[in-house]
Image: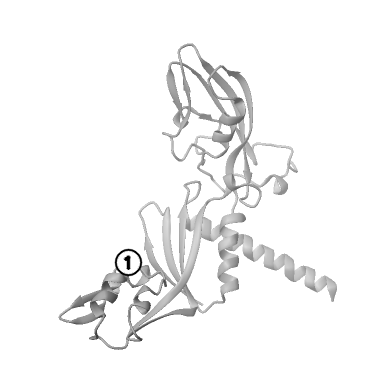
Amino acid sequence: MEIRLLEKNKDLTRLSFILKGVEPAFVNSLRRYMINKVPTLAIEDVEFRKNSSALYDEIIAHRLGLMPLTTDIKSYNLPQDCKCKGVGCSQCQLKITLKAKGPKTVYGSELKSADPKVQPVFPETPIVKLLKDQEIEFVAVASMGVGKEHIKWSPGLVYYKHKPDIKIVKNSFENAEKVAEQCPVEIFSFKGNKLTLNNDNLMKCTLCNACVDSCKGEVTVEPEKDTFIFYVEAWGQLNAKEIINKAMSVFDKALDTFSEKIKETE
């Protein structure tokens, strides 16, 4: 297996890399583990003390549940893996409170967390608009969970595609300029009556075959069967590197458990 980093931004919320020498089943398993098995914190229960706003309790609770929270995966456990056995303690959940009175728009930045490390990823997210003398007060409980249980615990968007193998068999032909124009991601350039590849854009190819359909075999586009371009876009609870590392850790643990079960049957 070969891994090569393609791109990452400063805060590691977006990351892409090339994975070579693997089967599609492995790549898809890795993707599914990142989306469904990496634990994060999200609001699960809300106890309303006051709510005279125009929104029902259920609507506000739903908004709160889908608000991404920064997560320290080293400090919190999944309820089923916690010492409290899911009853609820400081190692698997925490309290978040809010008390506000109108007229004003209540934002995520006004949530008071029992753990300073756990805060809304996007503090400018509006929760509810209060008119004059309207009030809202609640105590919420955020707990650890995984995307398989509910999408609010999913840490980000993860997807992949085959690495394209693009070849120009003949540089100059009748529809060469049209081939360059048809490509939606500008893989080709047409200069001096010749078709050339823009190497900086090669990884952007979506394998749509618009170029192939515009010619008669002068250009070929094939997916490399054992090479994939992997993309990880974090929602903000964790950064992309943390998502990948945790997914691999959970994946390895699952394989160890599977191996032990196989040995028991021997």
Q: Is residue 256 visible?
A: yes
Q: Is residue 263 left or right of residue 64?
A: right
Residue type at the position of mark 1: Val
- Give the residue pinned by disc 1: 185
Image-quadrant location for residue 12:
bottom left
Residue 120 percent coordinates (x, y): 48, 37
* Residue 210 higher or lower than 68, as above or below: below
- Near-viewer residue (207 or 129): 207
Residue at 44 percent across and 34 percent down: it is 125
Q: Counting other residues with Cα less than 10 Å from the Cα at mark 1, is it few (<14), some (14-19), or many (20 or more)? A: some
- Near-viewer residue (208 or 110): 208
Residue 239 percent coordinates (x, y): 47, 52
Name, please, the residue furthest toward the bottom.
170
Residue 168 percent coordinates (x, y): 31, 84
Under circle 1, the secondary element is: loop
The quarter of the picture where the C terminus appears is bottom right
Residue at 24 percent across and 84 percent down: it is 174
Residue 41 percent coordinates (x, y): 58, 43
- Near-viewer residue (129 or 121): 129
* Residue 172 higher or lower than 258, as above or below: below
Image-quadrant location for residue 175:
bottom left
Residue at 43 percent across and 67 percent down: it is 17
Q: Is residue 187 left or right of residue 264?
A: left
